[in-house]
Amino acid sequence: QVRLVESGGGSVQAGGALRLSCTASGYPDYPINCMGWFRQAPGKEREGVAVIYTGGGSPYYADSVKGRFTIFLEDTKNTVYLSMNSLKPEDTAMYYCASVGRTCGSMTRAVLNGGNFEDATWGQGTQVTVSS
């Protein structure tokens, strides 16, 4: 089975930048069709941030992060990154990496709608804290 391990979280001031990474083990023995990032702030539901398809094509972003965050895959396609710039205090959350081995439509809709998504493999999460 696929196992995801995130790293790269931390604390920054508003306007700063961080890069998160998520490495998948078990790939390609277990297929991954898309990988995404979700986040959950205290007292709020988990929401989609960005998703990218391993087969290529443009990634998708939540409106709240469009233009500030970039998701991209390493060539070997077993590591996905989330480059976060111009961070705001409202970006403070636990960030989770997710992967899907089947169709990616539900994960993509969750990202575009800023909603939650359950049917995926999840990492353990990495904390991002942005101070004003």
Image: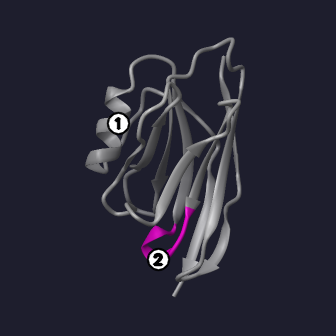
Residue at 58 percent of width and 16 percent of height: 31
Q: Give the image location of residue 92, x and y in percent.
A: 51, 69
Q: Nearer the viewer, residue 59 or 110?
A: 59
Q: Give the image location of residue 54, x and y in percent.
A: 53, 28
Q: Nearer the viewer, residue 10 or 29?
A: 29
Q: Which residue is mark 1?
A: 108
Instruction: Report the amino acid beneath label 1.
Output: Thr
Q: Residue furthest top?
A: 29
Q: Give the image location of residue 34, x and y in percent.
A: 49, 29
The image's mark for residue 88 is 2
Residue at 38 percent of width and 59 percent of height: 44
Magenta-highlighted residues: 84-92
The image's mark for residue 19 is none
Q: Residue furthest left?
A: 113
Q: Which secondary structure, mark 2?
A: loop
Q: Is residue 72 left or right of residue 113?
A: right
